[in-house]
Structures are given as C-alpha cells and as structure tokens.
Amino acid sequence: MNLRPELRMSNSDPKPVDQTPHAFAGGSWKPFKEQLSSPPVATIRLITWNIDAESQCGPLRMAGALRYLEGLTNTFPREIPLIIFFQEVVRNDLMLLQAAPWVRARFALTDTDSNHWKAPYYGTTTLVDRRLPLSRVYRAFYKDTQMDRDGLYVDIATKPAASSQRILRFCNTHLESLDAAPPLRPAQFAEASQHLHAPSIHAGILAGDLNAIEPFDRALHVTCDFKDAYLEAGGKEDSHEGYTWGYQSYAEVQDRFGPGRLDKVLFCGRVKVRGLQRIGIGVKVEEAKRAKMRSFGALEFVTDHYGLMADVVVD
C-alpha cells in the first residue's frame, strides 16, 4: 500500500521504455549482457516484497530486510535461479542493494539509479539471477495513475538462443493505492495483462503489491485470464493465512483498513506456480538499532508488508 496521495492525475505514455540492467564486475556496476550460453530454464524461484517507502528510518529497515533475505536465500538449493521483486524502493535503497556483497555476487539489477522512475520519491526494482538468460528489461507506465505507477518487465529466454526461444515474462508492479472514482486498478491491471498475454510470450508472471482493497479487485485476475497462485493452492479469501498486510502497521492504520491480501502472485500461459508462502513475518531491524527507531516513534518491523515466495515451473 502507500497512504500518501498525490495531487494530480498523470496521463502517462504507455509506450515501453527499455532499460539496461547492470551487474557488478571489476569493482563497479557495468551493463549486463544476455547469457547466451545459459542452459534451458525449468524452474525459477520468485520473491516479491513491498519494502515500505513511508515509514521512518528507511536505511535501517532496508538493511534489516537485506540481512534477512541474505540468510533466507542462503538456504535455497543453489541450482534454482532466483528473481526478487521490490516495491516502494527509495533512492537510498538502491545504494544499499548495490553495496551488498551477496547482491553483487549473484544478481543483475534493473535499476542502479532512479532515472526510470516517474514518481519523485520511490519506485520498483528487480534483481535477476546472473545465470538466467535475460533478454530484455523495460518499464511501461500506466496510462491513468495518480501515483506514477508502472509495470517493470523482465524477459527470460527459457531455451537457448540456438533453439526456438520461449519467453517467460515477469512483471513487477505496484498498482494504485487507496480508492479512486472511477477506480484506476482495473485499467492498470488490463494494461499489464496485454504485455503478459502477448502472442510471443510463452508464459507470464504478474506479482507485487496489487493493493487489492475493494471487492472488484478479487475478480481482476479472472477478467484478465490469470490464475491466482494462492487460490490455485486451495487458499481462501478473507483468511488470515493469506493476508500480507495489516499486522505490522500502526494501530490507527490497522483500524482504518484492517488486514488484507494486498500482495499476490498471478500467472498465465504455459507455466505453473508452486509452493507459495509468505516470508518476512515479524522481521525487525537488528536489535542494536531498535532503541533508535523507538525514539522516533517508529515501528521496529523492516516493512509493513509480508513478502511472498514461490517457484515458477515452466511447462
């Protein structure tokens, strides 16, 4: 979510804007080229997490989130490549990402600065495992948005270039927060759907903070021909087991909005999503820094959202 309303409507150009990913080599971040020799891709592990741009002590919170993710990812089978989506990243977070040794060693970054964001304060960014055959990165801004929201797309060639390529397209998005008249999220969702259902795409993954706070949000994936990983696994709406937001927020915010399943992993095409689970539950900044956060009246959690993790299996 994001509780900071903007004062204007942005009629953005929906034309995609290509970005150059970067990887760390020779002591600096350099443009990253597609790994043409990569083996065929069968399974990719996906993490998505809204890191909360609004709360105080942002650097402490992002440092805590990265420390947690480093420990978590160290437990994964090494042979499974990883993609990480972040929403509500601020400029300082990009610096922390680039300074983290485990990020430098393993990932290409879609953003090393905020030049591709239209929002003045925060945006989205994606980490892509270096071993993946990354063929394209681009950003498409939603036509109607009050908060400069967009979809950040990453194309992975699931077969070597010498064979008939199959493109797996990932979309990292943060749909419009709060309510609007008329609603903005349905049109934004439909725009993202067009990119993920394109004829050249073997399968598509849409994940992030979808801000599903109104009744119509529950049907958007059906309207646009997606499957919801949580529901496909037998999850139920209005269940605490599925909620991703509301438990790590200030009491007055919880009272106003209540808990909800704001974050989702959706998919379409010839792909399956397995093992969906929430992550980041109860994660706080390091113990030595908590007194400082309390002195500012800030909560000790690294973010007000739980993250999601799942395996994407290509058919």
Image: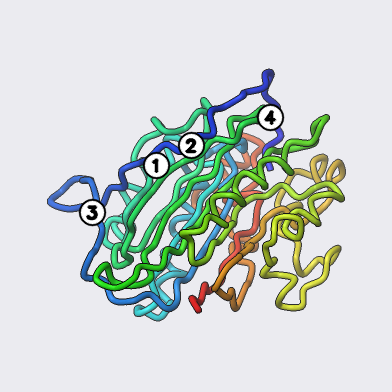
Q: Work out whether residue 286 can be spotted.
A: no
First reached walking from the N terminus: tag 4 or tag 2: 4
Q: Position of residue 247 (x, y in %)?
A: 75, 55
With respect to residue 113, does 208 lie above or below? below
Q: Gap in Å between the C-alphas at discs 3 and 4?
A: 37 Å
What secondary structure is marked by label 2?
Answer: strand
**Left or right of 83: which side holds 54?**
right
Amino acid at dot 2: Val
- Mark nearest the camera among 3 and 2 is 3
Residue depicted at x 43% and y 68% = 71
Q: Horizontal and vertical percent for residue 63?
A: 45, 50
Amino acid identity at mark 1? Leu
Asked if disc 1 and disc 2 are in contact, CB closer than 8 Å, the reply is yes
Q: Is residue 106 left or right of residue 14?
A: left
Question: How far separated are the C-alphas under marks 1 and 3?
Answer: 20 Å
- Residue bearing mark 1: 94
Q: Decide: is 129 above or below 215.
A: below
Q: Badge 4 is on which residue?
A: 4
Identity of the residue furthest to the left in this view: 26
Q: How many residues crowd mark 4 within 10 Å: few (<14), some (14–19), many (20+)?
A: few
* Horizontal and vertical percent position of residue 108: 32, 54
Q: Residues within 10 Å of mark 2 (few under 14, many from 20)?
A: many
**Colouring convention used in this rendered image of the protein:** rainbow
Q: Which residue is mark 2?
A: 90
- The nearer-to-camera label among 3 and 4 is 3
Residue 33: assigned label: 3
Spatial distance from mark 1 to mark 2, Cα to Cα? 7 Å
Name the element at disc 3: loop
Per the image, label 4 sits on a secondary structure element best described as loop
Quadrant of the snapshot with the N terminus: top right
- At label 3, counting other C-alpha atoms closer than 10 Å, the crowd grade (few under 14, some 14-19, many 20 or more) is some
